[in-house]
Amino acid sequence: MTFDTPIDRTGSHCVKWDMMPALYGLAPDEGLAMWVADMEFRPPACVQQALERMLAHGVYGYFGDDRAYLEAIRWWMAYRHGWDVAPEWIFTTHGLVNGTALCIHSFTRPGDGIILMTPVYHAFSRIIKAAGREVVECPLALAEGKAQLDIPAWEAQLTGRERMVILCSPHNPGGRVWSGDELRAVADFCQRHDLILVSDEIHHDLVYPGHTHTVMAKAAPGIADRLVMMTATTKTFNIAGAHIGNVIIADPKLRKTFANTINAMGISPNSFGMHMATAAYSPEGAAWVDDLMRYLDGNRRLFDEGIATIPGLRSTPLEATYLAWVDFSGTGMAAADFIARVEKQAKIATNHGESFGKGGASFLRFNLACPRAQVAEAIRRLQRAFADLQ
């Protein structure tokens, strides 16, 4: 299999394609699904083989003896990120949205403020509100189309009720890889205001040539007493349906608090996800990711070149992730108008920027993790839909 090989996902209970008619009014045979953040690629063969061994055995009981699983995580973090992780620091959650929710319940109380650097992944806001906490939106600044920290402005709006910051690193949807200095600035901000820092690094393996991700635990080792790290195999290897993620906590006090929440909610691991993650974090998995990023880099370049031909549209320079963040403000159109052109004329399903919070209203998010022919087709459709601007 190559990344160019199309895979028909319709009828497989796939959110991205099977929910497109209900949510966008687009049939799969006419629309392009470029919204949900999963890939149109099969995972590496080692992951598929791990599942095949489970199927051949035929008994699907509780998972035990997690030593190989923990060692795979430890090896990956050391090999790919230069980060030494002790096995006892690692918790397994049902994905990182679940991991974030568990952090909110562990380290904050109803009514507390939780800071989001917006525009940012929309699920954060949803779970904060559902937990009875307050979303505190601290908008990112823009410089040459790239997201930038604006800490002085954020400090000016604090009320003293804030207890936590959720950092998206690399950033979704802006595609930024934060520099070491930027990460240390966030860490200092948290120390000054006595805030727990939850660093969601689910995209940390999806970084393009010329950029290097630094894990927050390495960038600011002095804040271990307030730092919660979150990582996962799911985005990297396209196994989101496994619903498995890791919350990694070095500080014993924070770890005890989080463990109490895990125990109180009766959370235990999904054996399918454990086997898949163990297989993925391997030399074979690493080679597959390297091939993936070379392919995605080609998709990114093709998409950006195409968007640049359409007056009024601007594609944010992607440093990481496969999620293109396109600004339509230069068209002078209201959001409803440019969304209608993209969905009704171009027949492309995207994520609406408004759902990502302040600063997102003029944007749409496009998923580029698909065969290159689909990216090329999306560009052709967008060029036709905005042809009157040429």
Image: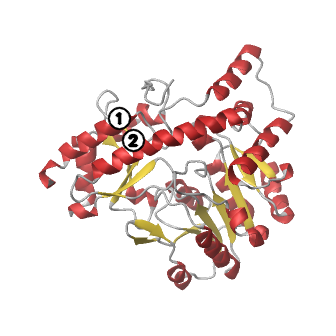
Question: Can residue 156 be seen from the camera position used here?
Answer: yes
Residue 211 image position (x, y, % from top left): 54, 57
347 and 323: which is toward the camera: 323
Disc 1 marks a residue whose amino acid type is Gln
Q: Quadrant of residue 271?
A: top right
Number of residues whose C-alpha sits closer than 10 Å to that of mark 2, classed few (under 14), some (14–19) or many (20 or more): many
Number of residues whose C-alpha sits closer than 10 Å to that of mark 1, classed few (under 14), some (14–19) or many (20 or more): some
Question: Can residue 25 be seen from the camera position used here?
Answer: no
Residue 202 image position (x, y, % from top left): 61, 50
Q: Which residue ends up furthest to the front in the rendered image?
A: 210
User: Is disc 2 placed on a helix, strand or loop?
Assistant: loop
Residue 93 image position (x, y, % from top left): 71, 46
Q: Which residue is mark 1?
A: 374
User: In this picture, is 346 found above or below 364?
Assistant: above
| Residue at horizontal 21 percent and vertical 57 percent from the top | 311
Going by the image, does 245 lie left or right of 389?
right
Q: Which mark is residue 203?
A: none
- The colour scheme applied to this rendered structure is secondary structure
| Residue at horizontal 47 percent and vertical 31 percent from the top | 3
Q: Nearer the viewer, mark 2 or mark 1?
A: 1
Q: How much space separates mark 2 and mark 1, taking CA atoms?
A: 9 Å
| Residue at horizontal 54 percent and vertical 79 percent from the top | 151
Q: Which residue is mark 2?
A: 34
Mark 2 / mark 1, whichever is N-terminal: 2
